[in-house]
Image: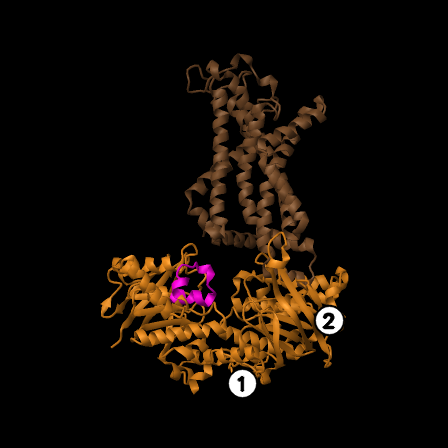
Amino acid sequence: MDNQNLSFINKIKDSDIYFAFIKSPTAIISTTILIIIFFCSFFVELIAPFNPFDPSSLDLMEAFTPPSWEEGGMSKFLLGTDGQGRDMLSTILYGSRISLIVGFAAILFSLILGVSLGLTAGYFGGKYEMIVMRITDVQLTVPSILMALLVDGIARGVISKELHDEMAIYVLIFAIGISEWPQFARVSRAATLVEKNKDYISASTIIGVPNIKIMFKHILPNILRPILVIGTIGLALAIIAESTLSFLGVGVPPTTPSLGTLIRIGNDFLFSGEWWITFFPAIFLVILAFSINLLGDWMRDTLNPKLN
Amino acid sequence: MSFLKIDNLSVNYRMRKETINAVKNINFDVKKGEILGLVGESGSGKSTLGSAIINLIDEPGKISGGKVILDGINIHENPGDILKYRGKKIGLIFQDPQTSLNPLLTIGEQLIETIQTHLNFNFNESKDRAITLLQEVGIKDAENRFDNYPHQFSGGMRQRVVISLALCCEPDLLIADEPTTALDVSIQSQILELIKTLTKVRNLAVILITHDMGVISETADRVAVMKNGDLVEIGLTKEILTNPKEIYTKSLISSVPPTNKKISRFKIMEKKENNAGRTNIKILDRWNKKNLTSQNLIEVKNLKKTFQEGMFNEASKNTIMAVDDVSFNIREGESFGLVGESGSGKSTIAKMIVNLFKPSSGEIFFDKVCITKIKKNSEMMNFRKQIQMIFQDPYSSLNGRLKVKDIIAEPIKLHNPKITNNDLDNYINDLLESVELSKKSSTRYSHEFSGGQRQRISIARALATQPRLLVCDEPTSALDVSIQAQILNLLKDLQEQLNLTILFISHDLPVVRQMCDRIGVLRNGKLCEVSDTEKLFLEPKHEYSKELLRLMPKIESIYN
């Protein structure tokens, strides 16, 4: 077992991707930042100095404390507090967890939907392909944020008010997911068309392998690379979309704030001088999205055989 | 007095893990008015050597030593000076005429651009010169074709334009890197004839890089044989071909399929031949061997296939008749060859027989059952099992994401779902050994293998369903001659011992002669002639067959 692990590590060290990775400072820096953010967000209970959702720990007297290095700052609130006396650093970390969960879940949803539609469309062709691709064309003309707003609006109408806060996060995932799938469909269809004409697919057909198996056992693993690349860039987009929606007030409720909700709350205090309430969540969001995009860019350059 | 002297030239490629010496201390010279053939298999460094002469090596490669002396001057001494020689003193012809011309410029513009870059000519002078050149390389009606774009020329004509481009500035040295590999036989012979004439008329020194021994024997005055970056042997073509000194050259020449006779199998020099050279076909014990009857296994009747261009199906205009009313039979146990040039429809016929395409009209009978009318998948499975195919390109015919054992296990499990894991492993090992691969290969991925080994994996996969008919679509045209010889030997052994029927598709007449009992000659989708192999080669009936046989490069021509 140990031996197997060792050889696995050696195999990774031996691979071209690892080599390209250690040669690229951009990739190393962005990955490091992302690992830190992911770690802090998912083990937030252990890391955050306060639990901002525990009302007993809040003290309204401590509201609007500026960051610790400013005049009037307190050393226990590194990045200051918001209007309810919640520690900003802790709130941001809890908020980024929600943003990341929504982002990942939404992108996974659109990936599964988009890839299965694109793959089948590319493989079977004909009328089915035409219908699927025209739907994606139509959806691409609607800005994705509008699409998400529309879905959210409909959900508000359908789901009762009491349930809505509970359901908000799922509605959000669905709304963002449904607005992002067309690019997965397009990319996977294009890649499928290329793979479909290769001889190994003909060979499988001649052997008599059923279509579904050809698609998922033979084609899917061979088109994963471009999908992974747009998936990564899509993750950044989904996180930003979540923040935008929350900023507009249609996202997650303020009781469990995400980064976007925090920015919106802070926005109200911006003109009265409490800049830190909106600034720190915003800068955190920028760093998060920027790192994911840099990593995605690097992946596109490395994994795309055409650019090598 | 030699015109070009290569003195101790070496090229290194510094890779991540090691430095590859692609060209190792090569010495030779070329005289004016002489064609030196540079021959070798893939990876022998022949193309790298060609590029190294004009200092056109891509990163991470580097010329690590040696001199190239052209007319008494070391042209590598001052790297900035090389531009004075490229194009002007040294002309280049590349393999693919499709990509060596700029599709957005007319051929006239490209010629004039080149002439004006190197020579101090005004527009009219350059134009006159360009037209003279085009006439010289045999382009008819050169004044009018001057303003045509590359896509308006056929492949052969385009290669002529490329040659005229190379000759623009009266070079003294011409480097031709596989100039005819992308062309059909009939055009190949014209281009080679043109290069020969130009060499004489213009007193050029020519380096002809090729893998094709037939081309060498018909064109080159002297030949240099390369292997792994080393120069193995150099000498007069006749001497090298008839009386090679080095073992490598001997084995190379013995793997070239002879055009004038049929041999039972190729001699493989490097391998110790046990069992009188026969492959040990382990799979034989499992094989459900059918006794051969002299009946027809395949009957093709009035087969037609049309492809429609354009999405709105204005069929009348753009219909391409890929296969036009073709009928033939293949008897059980025989090898039937289909030959033809590119676009003759031979691959399309193969794909209809294995049921990848549906014919537009006509029928295909397998063992007296019409397989083109079967609708039900379950019925079709029965035939899928009996007809298998081997493809041309060994790189795209295997799924790179699967291990070899999974590739071979797929057909076995599909047609024999009850097989136990233990038995499956044994079956896979037997198959691998039957195609002369080691058991260890089963846990590796296909990209770890060479082209020839990949083709063996393909064969093993095809044999896994125990087929009666094996369709081989140019199975060796992507391989080197020595590997080709091994694969052809293997196919022959398999056929003999497993009673296989083979449909062998190729553009390469000598190969077909070695492999097939009967041959059909295809041209533009029509079957010109079907005849026994020996009869076809000795007394072809159809005009086109005669033409093909006349133009085929013959390695034996050197003996006369």
**Picture residue at 65% right of the left edge, 64% below the top:** B305
Asked whether the residues under the numbered discs 2 and 1 touch, taking CB atoms below 8 Å apart as contact, a structural biologist would say: no
* Quarter of the rendering occupied by the N terminus of chain B: bottom left
Q: Are marks 2 and 1 on the same chain?
A: yes
Query: Which residue is the site of mark 2?
Result: B365
Give x and y (percent) for residue A270: 48, 17
For mark 2, give the secondary structure: strand
Left or right of residue B219, residue A230 in this image: right
Provide the major secondary structure of the magenta segment: helix
Magenta stretch in the rendered image? B142-163
Residue type at numbered disc 1: Lys
Q: Is residue B543 magenta?
A: no
Chain ID at mark 2: B
Residue A12 vertical placement versus B24 (above, below) = above
**Picture residue at 76% right of the left edge, 70% below the top:** B369
Whether residue B280 is visible: no
The hue of chain B in the figure is orange
For mark 1, give the secondary structure: loop
Residue type at numbered disc 2: Phe
Furthest residue in direction left, as rendered: B72
Sequence order check: which comes first, mark 2 or mark 1? 1
Whether residue A149 is visible: yes
Give x and y (percent) for residue B127: 32, 61
Q: Which mark is residue B261?
A: 1
Q: Which mark is residue B396?
A: none
The hue of chain A in the figure is brown
Give x and y (percent) for residue B526: 61, 72
Chain ID at mark 1: B
Front-most of B87 and B136?
B136
Q: Disc 2 to disc 1, how far (Cα)?
A: 33 Å
Q: Quarter of the image holding residue A199?
A: bottom right
Residue B257 vertical placement versus B420 (above, below) = below
